[in-house]
Amino acid sequence: AYVKMLAATDFKSSDAVYGSANMLQGMKCEIEALNLTESEHTWEKLMNALDNISVALEELGAVDPDNILVGKRETEPTLNLLCTKLQEIRRSIGACVTSDRGRLHTAALRCVQSMSQVISGEFVIREMDQMQYLAKLASRPKRHVHERAIESMVVVCSNSKDPSSFPAVIAACKQYPKSVSARCAAAECAKSFLEHYNYKKSDMEAFIGAAIQDDAAKVREKTKEIATLYVEVSDADTVERVRSKIPSRFQKTIFGPAATTVQAAPRARLRARSARGRVGVKGVARG
């Protein structure tokens, strides 16, 4: 019934905003269900509650494609009620995100994505504090699990318009330094922020400089893509600054053959001289 009411609503009216803000207030059963502790007997109730919240949010987004509601958040106290209700259950949603049950964490990921698309990515990152849970899921060893988490993280990042969200996401991924998939998640998120021009140069350059030296080849490869794209959209001064932070062995891949450093030639001569010396010694031994 609420969805039908939304479909016939003009979101430019204050009454409509009030109705949407009460969306979750009227969903007492779902909120009560999300206060349950996950167990063999409760996980389906949690999953259904998350699905119902996702459907409501998606329907709200369908009838408000221009995000008029989000634009009114600062001036409409009633709209804040919607966000407040979600914040009340943020830990419960996070616990479902990191669940070992695939159907439950899939429902939670859908809910998180819906929040980012309808409200905003920065709301999910900073106010709902969901990135710590998504990063934890992304650190799991099973490929299909961490790929789901990374996909959700990218969706959230692509819906963020706050540059301060970028370092918050990277910090969440750094909580799992031994996980290659978590570090790959950080790279994918960085690429999303870069593609949407939603970052501070200092943050992006710091990430590139550190990640390009990662122990995992997969992370280095993703970082090379980010660095190449960053160089393409940057001015000459920025390119030189990035070059100074990247080890010389990676510069040819990112900047091209002409990007060899001044020290490259002396090092090449030294290697050639060393090779000749080894050949000479062998020749004397044979003689």
Image (cartoon, rainbow, N blue to C red):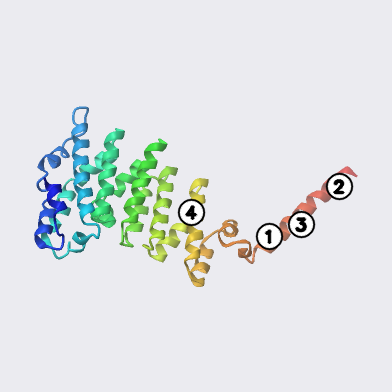
Q: Earlier in the sequence, mark 2 or mark 3?
A: 3
| Mark 1 lies on residue | 267
Residue under numbered circle 2: 283
Mark 1 → mark 3, Cα distance in angstroms: 10 Å
First-in-chain label (4 vs 3): 4
Ranked by sequence position, the earlier of labels 1 and 2 is 1
- Mark 4 Cα-neighbour bin, 10 Å: few <14, some 14–19, many ≥20: many
**255 to 94, vertically: above or below:** below
Which badge, 1 or 3, is on the more N-terminal residue? 1
Q: Amino acid at mark 3?
A: Arg
From the image, state whether disc 4 or disc 3 is nearer to you.
Answer: 4
Q: Please tell me whether mark 2 or mark 4 is closer to you in this view.
A: 4
> Could you tell me how many numbered marks the image carries?
4
Q: Residue furthest front?
A: 8
Q: Are marks 2 and 3 in contact (CB under 8 Å)?
A: no
Q: Which residue is disc 4 drawn over?
A: 223
Residue in the image at 34% along x and 49% along y:
153
Name the residue: 14% across, 50% down: 85
> Which of 235 and 52 lies nearest the eye of the viewer?
52
Inspect the image, locate mark 1, and give the three-letter code of the amino acid beneath it: Arg
> What kind of residue is marked 4?
Thr
Kindly report the distance in space between the C-alpha atoms of the residues bearing marks 2 and 4.
Answer: 45 Å
Q: Earlier in the sequence, mark 2 or mark 4?
A: 4
Q: Nearer the viewer, mark 4 or mark 1?
A: 4
- Gap between marks 4 and 3 measured at Cα: 34 Å
Q: Point out residue 194 in the picture as x, y percentages from the top left corner.
A: 41, 60
Query: Circle 2 — which element?
Result: helix
Image quarter (top left, top right, bottom left or bottom right) of the N terminus: top left
Q: Which residue is denoted by mark 3 in the rendering? A: 273
Quarter of the picture containing the C terminus is top right
